[in-house]
Image (tube, coloured by chain):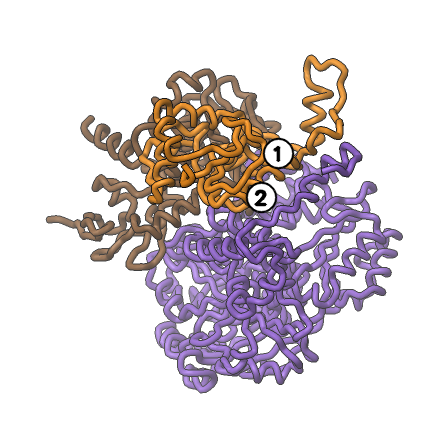
Amino acid sequence: MKICQFTNDIIASFNQQPDMLLQILIKIQRQYSFIPQQAITQLSKELLITEANIISVIGFYAFLHTKARGHYDLRVSHNITDQMLGSVKLTAMLTDKLSVQLATPRKDARVSVDLTSCTGMGDQGPAILVNGKPVVGLNKKRIEIICQLIESGTPVKQWPAEFFQIKNNIQRKDILLSDRSDNGAAIRALLKQGAQKLLQQIEHSNLRGRGGGGFKTGLKWRLCQQATAKQRYVVCNADEGEPGTFKDRVLLTTQADKLIEGMTLCAGVINSDLKRPCKGFIYLRGEYQYLYESLEQVLQKRRDAGLLGKNILGKQGFDFDIKIHLGAGAYICGEESALIESLEGKRGIPRNRPPFPVTKGYKAQPTVVNNVETFINAALIAIHGSDWFKKVGTEQSSGSKLLSISGDCARPGIYEYPFGTSIKQVLVDCGALNTQAVQVSGAAGFTIPVQYFGRCIAFEDIPTGGSFIVFNQQRDLLDMVKNFSDFFADESCGFCTPCRVGSSLLKQLIDKVHQGLASNRDLDEIKKISQLMCKTSHCGLGGSAPSSIMDTLAHFPQLYQQRLKNMNNEPVFDLDAELQQARQLNGVDNV
Amino acid sequence: MANKIKIATASLCGCFGCHMSLLDIDERLIDLVKLVEFDRSPFTDIKTIGDCDIGIIEGGVANAENVEVLREFRKQCKTLVAIGACAIDGGIPALRNGFTLKECLQESYVDGIGIDNPMIPSDPELPLLLNKVQPIQEVVKVDYFVPGCPPSADTIWTFLTELIEGKPISFTYGQIRYD
Amino acid sequence: MSTFQIFYLNGKPIPFKQGETIMDAALRAGEYIDHLCHHPEFRPHGSCRICMVELDGKSVSSCTQPAIANTQVDSSSDEMIEQRRSLLQMLFVEGNHICPGCEKSGDCQLQALAYQNKMLSPHFKHFFPKRALDASHPDVIIDFDRCILCELCVRASRDVDKKNIFCVDGRGINAKLIINSPGGKLGNSHFSADDKAAQICPVGAILPKHQGYDIPIGKRRYDQQPISEVDMDNQEKDQQK
C-alpha cells in the first residue's frame, strides 16, 4: 500500500483528531519501521500540525524514528538487572554475529540493534524487544538462534513460542493477589452505597498512591469531584518505567478486570452527579505493547457484561468507557502531567503546577491519574470495606505493597507484603545471600546498605513504587550508579536547565570515576551538581536522578575513593587520549 | 628587594592581547614593579620558571607543549591565575572544537582557498595538537579567573593589587566582561 | 476595597493579587528577580530555572509559583546567588557561547545575568557541541551555538505571529531548536524580521543581519548598568508613556 494511503487510513481510523498524533505515529512506525517524510507531510496536512511539530514529537520518543530501522528492529534491555545477568556480553555477541553496529541499521536493512531502558523483565532477563515483542531469558543459545532466524528471514510470528513466554513469577500473595471477588462486585458496592459513602470509605482506608508518590487517593478523587468541569477523566498510569519494576506487568496480565473495576469505580465517584460524560484511558508503556490485545479483550468482555460502556449495571446515566493509549519509550511519561501531555499526543514534558491534574488535567479538565495497583486496591476497598483494608499494614501505610524483586536472589519475582515488612524479611524470603545493598524504588530510589536492613517498606520509612534490586557482596555498586546515570541522561526530557545539562554532566563525571580517571575535585563536582539538580529541577526526574549517587557517596564512599587517580583537587587530564587524533594523523608517537 | 612577590606569565593558545592589556595599566606599572618581580614571562624573555608566588596564564590549551608549560607553571607557582577568555573557556580558538582535528587541518592546509602546495604539516619539531582546545582548568587546578577578551587594564589592576594585598577580589560591575 | 495581600521579598513587602506569581508581583512593585525564559508578555514557562527563589525555605521558580500571603521569599542570599551562577554556568557550557565573537555581546541577557551574578568562569566542563549556523534568511541569522532553549521564539511565533515556525526537537542534552520549513532552513519559512519572534531572543541566537555593530561594544544596554537596573528603568519609562 502507498504510504499516503496507509497514513490516510490510519488518520481516518482515529477520526482525524490531532491529539491522536502519537497513537497514529506508533502505527506508522510499526508498518514502515520509521515515519517516512510522505507520512509526515500527510499528517501535517490532515491534522493541521506543523511538520516541525510532528518531527519534534517523533524526536521525543525513543521508539519512533525519522530514518528507517532494520526489518528486524532489536532493542536490548539495558537495565542494571539485565547487565547483572550478562546482557553486555550477549549484546556484543549479538552485534558481532549480525555484523551490525549499535544504533546503526545494517547496510542491507535486515536488522538494527539498539539499547533501551528497562523493559520490565527484571525477574527473567536479560530481555530484548524484537519489533516491539519481548523475548526473555536471553542466553548464548538464544542469541545464536535469534541470529539464525534473522539471517534466514523467518517472520517473528514463526519464532519459537517459548521465546515470548513471559512468566508471572508470583512468589508471595497477600490481600490483593489472593482476592477472588466477582467481577462487578466493586461497582455493585458503589451503586449500593452511593458515591459519597464510597468516597468516604476510600478516604477512611488511607489508601495512598502505589506508583511511589504516596498521595492520598481519596483526597485526589475528592478534589477531582469538586472541580468544575465540562468532562472528567480517569487515567491509569501503566507506564511502569522505573528500572527494576515489573509488578504492573503482572497486574495487567492477571488482574486486568479488577484494574478496570477500580477505574470504573473512580469514574462513578468523581462524576457522581452523572450529568457529564466521563472517559478513561489506560496509558500503557510501549514496552508492554504485547499486552494490548488481551487488555482490549477484557474491556470488550466487560462491555458485553454491562460493566463498562453505557448505563453500567443498569444505572441510568452511568456511562464510562476506556481507551488504551500506548507510550513509545519515554520514562518521563510516568510523571502524571507528562503522561497527560503524551495522552494529548504531544512531547511528554511535565507541566507547571499548579494547576494540578485534578483540576486541570487531560484537555484542561479535571483528571485523576492513578497507578495500576492503586486502582485495584480501591476496588478491593469498595468490596471489603476500609476497616478490612486498614487491618493490613501500618498506621500510616495501610494495605499491602507489591514488590518486583530482581538481582542477586534465588527466587526473583512478585512479592506482595503488608506495609511495615522489613528489608531483612524480604531478603530472607527471596533467598538473597551475602547481600551488600538493596536498591529500593528503582534508579530514582534509595540505595540501602546492610545497616539499614531492619528498616521497613512503608511511606513513613522506605517508600517505594515497587522496584527492589538485590546486590550481593561480589557486585561493584558503581556499575549500578553508572547504569543509572546513563539512564537519566538518556531519559531527561531536556526542558529545564539543571536536569538537561546536569544529568549529562553527571554521566560524564561518573564515567570518569568508573574508569579511574577522576580526582577529588570531580567528586566535589558530582556533589555540587547533584544538590543543584535536587533543588532546582522542574520535576521529580531531575530531583531524583542523583539519588543513587548521593546514597552511595554517603554509604559506600570507598567505591569512589578507591578509584580516584588524584586524591587532591588537581584535575586528571589524559594527555595521551587528547593526542590520539594528532598521532593518528601524523603517524608519530612524539609528545 | 628579596621580599618582592614573584610573578611569571605565559601565553598559551592566545593572542597576547591579555599581556598587552596588562601593559595598558600604563604608569601604574611603576607602582607594580615596586611590589613585584617578573620571572619567566614574555616581558622578561626569561625562558625557564623558578619558584613563583603568582603564575598568570593567558590562552587555552591547544597542543602538547601548552600542557607541558601549564603543568610547569602549576608546579612552580603558589597561585595560578587564568586570565582572559581563552584561558577560561578556550575562547576563539575553541571554535574548532565542533570539528575533528583532521577536518580542521584539512580545511586549513589542504582544501582552503588560495593554498599553494597543500599538505598537513608534520614536522616532528611541531608540538602535536590536542583533539580539542581546552580551558586551562581542565588540565590544572586554577585559583583565580579574570575574565575578558582581554580584561581591561583596570580589571587587571584591581585584581593584582587586591591579590597582592591579600584582600578578596572585588570587581566593580563594569570590570567583569567577557568581550 | 483592596484585594491585595502581602508577601516579603528579601524582607521588602510586596503586594499581590490572588493567583499572581511571585515574579509578576515583584516586577510590578519594581523589584527585579533574575530571569531568562520569562517574559511579561507571555505565559510563564519555567524552564531556565534562573528565577528560583526560596519561599519559606522551599525552592520554587518565581515565574510559575503563585505568591502566598505572609511568606518570606529570598532571592538575594549568597546561596541564591551561588545557585543562579551555577545554572548560568550550565547554560554557558552547554552551547558555544564565545562572547568575544558574538554580535550580541553587551546586549545579551545571559551574559548580563552572568555579570550581575559575578560569574568569573563557566566552571563546568564544556560540551562543545557541533551545531550548524543558518544564514539562509535574507534579514535574520540563526546561530544555534547560542540557543539556550528558553522557547521565547517558539512562543512568540506561535502565539503572537501565528506562524508556528519554531519548536524544540529531541530530548535531554540533545534537545534542539528546529524550524518549520522545507529542509528546515529559516530562509524557506515565512519568517520575517518584523516578527515578534525575530526580536525576542534573549541571547545571540536569532540576530538581525547588517546591524551587528551599529552600536559599538562598550556602549550597549548592559555594558554600564546591571540588567536589574536596566529592566526596571525601562519598565518605569513604559509606565510613564
Residue lying at 24% horizontally and 31% vertically, measured from the top left: C233
Give the x, y percent position of residue A426: 58, 81
With respect to residue C1, does A3 lie above or below?
Answer: above
Give the x, y percent position of residue A293: 66, 62
Residue lying at 69% horizontally and 23% vertically, measured from the top left: B107
Residue A301 image-quadrant placement: bottom right
Ranked by sequence position, the earlier of labels 2 and 1 is: 1
Q: Write down which chain is painted brown.
A: C
Residue B71 image-quadrant placement: top right
| Residue occupied by mark 1 | B62
Frontmost residue, C221 versus C151:
C221
Horizontally, residue A218 falls left or right of residue A131, namely left
Residue type at mark 2 is: Val
Q: Write down which chain is painted purple.
A: A
Residue lying at 83% horizontally and 52% vertically, measured from the top left: A96
Q: Write down which chain is painted orange.
A: B
Find out whether the residues at labels 2 and 1 contact each other: C-beta distance under 8 Å: no
* Mark carried by residue A397: none
Q: Note whether residue A23 is visible.
A: no
| Label 1: element kind | strand
With respect to residue A290, does A451 lie above or below?
Answer: below
Frontmost residue, A522 versus A412:
A522
| Residue occupied by mark 2 | B139
Q: Chain of mark 1?
A: B
| Label 2: element kind | loop
Q: Chain of mark 2?
A: B
Horizontally, residue A584 falls left or right of residue C114, namely right
